[in-house]
Amino acid sequence: MSAHPKSLFRRLGTAAAVSAIAVITLAGPASAHVTVSSDDSTMAAADAILTFRVPNEQDAATTTKVDIKFPVKDPIASVKPAAAPGWVVTSKTVKFTPPIKTDDGTITDGVGEVTYTAAPGSKGIAVGGFGAFQILVGPLPDANQVVFSVVQTYSNGKVSSWVEPVTDPANPPESPTPILVLHPATTAAAAPAAAAAPAVNLSSYAKKSDVSTGRNLGVLALIVAILGLVAGGVAIGRGRKEADGPAARTTSPTAK
């Protein structure tokens, strides 16, 4: 006999909650690096949202400050940090050397550093957890990669500086810089034709209006067919009466 749906959902919810609690309990501070990713990693992309993932690696301290520095070489003209609950966001303006030349003119300065500081009453990034900080930037450099540096400060005063250059990706240093790898805009266009999604012939699909029209015609045809059957039945009945009438009058004893 199957379990009642509500009971089944309640049991599944309880099991999921127990599993989540177990994962949180067993997960201790992991040895992870600060990383950066983007929703658009195309070279010279006009707008991209960078996400910096900052893990907490201390056993008995929380992360209370995250300082993100943007590259001096191939600088980014527009940097707009998103608000983060429990954090105070500040930025620092720097001079671009050389200046950034655009179609709208030359940009000589801009945001070169963004700092997230735990707000009063907030503990920051908890032990065993991580924080995600998003920044809207653009345009991205026309380069193979963008190298950032991040300085992470803990509540016990310890500082982790993610500033070591990565010369061999297969053997990264202990505290590597976060690197965003960029791809040429022509990568997708240069892909083999076989990898492209097959074209869809929209003409083979009925439009909503066509479906509605077909449905209406079908109903009308059904009504006509029913009326035809009714009319045919009436005609058959009348034919039988006319065929049986004379014979009934001839053989009936009361027909005299």
Image (cartoon, rainbow, N blue to C red):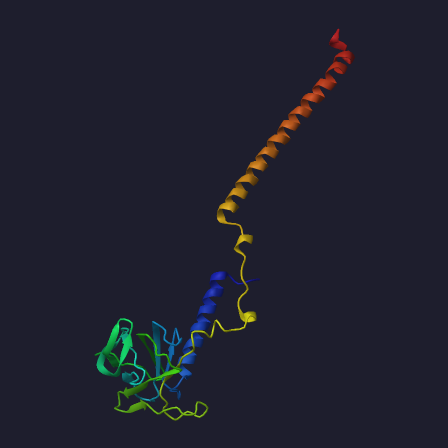
Q: Residue at x 31, y 90 (%)?
A: 160
In the displayed structure, would residue 73 be above or below residue 188? below
Q: Is residue 240 left or right of residue 72?
A: right
Q: Position of residue 202 (x, y in %)?
A: 52, 55
Looking at this rendering, what residue extends furthest in the right direction? 251
In the displayed structure, would residue 187 be above or below residue 232? below
Q: Position of residue 94 (x, y in %)?
A: 22, 82
Q: Is residue 126 left or right of residue 250?
A: left
| Residue situated in front as seen by the camera: 119 or 184 | 184
Q: Position of residue 60 (x, y in %)?
A: 31, 89
In the displayed structure, would residue 38 be above or below residue 60? above
| Residue situated in front as seen by the camera: 110 or 5 | 110
Q: Residue at x 55, y 39 (%)?
A: 217
Q: Is any atom of residue 111 visible in this view?
A: yes
Which quadrant does the C terminus fall into? Answer: top right
Q: Is any atom of residue 77 visible in this view?
A: no
Which quadrant does the N terminus fall into? Answer: bottom right
Q: Is residue 15 left or right of residue 73?
A: right
In the displayed structure, would residue 97 be above or below residue 255? below
Q: Position of residue 136 (x, y in %)?
A: 31, 73
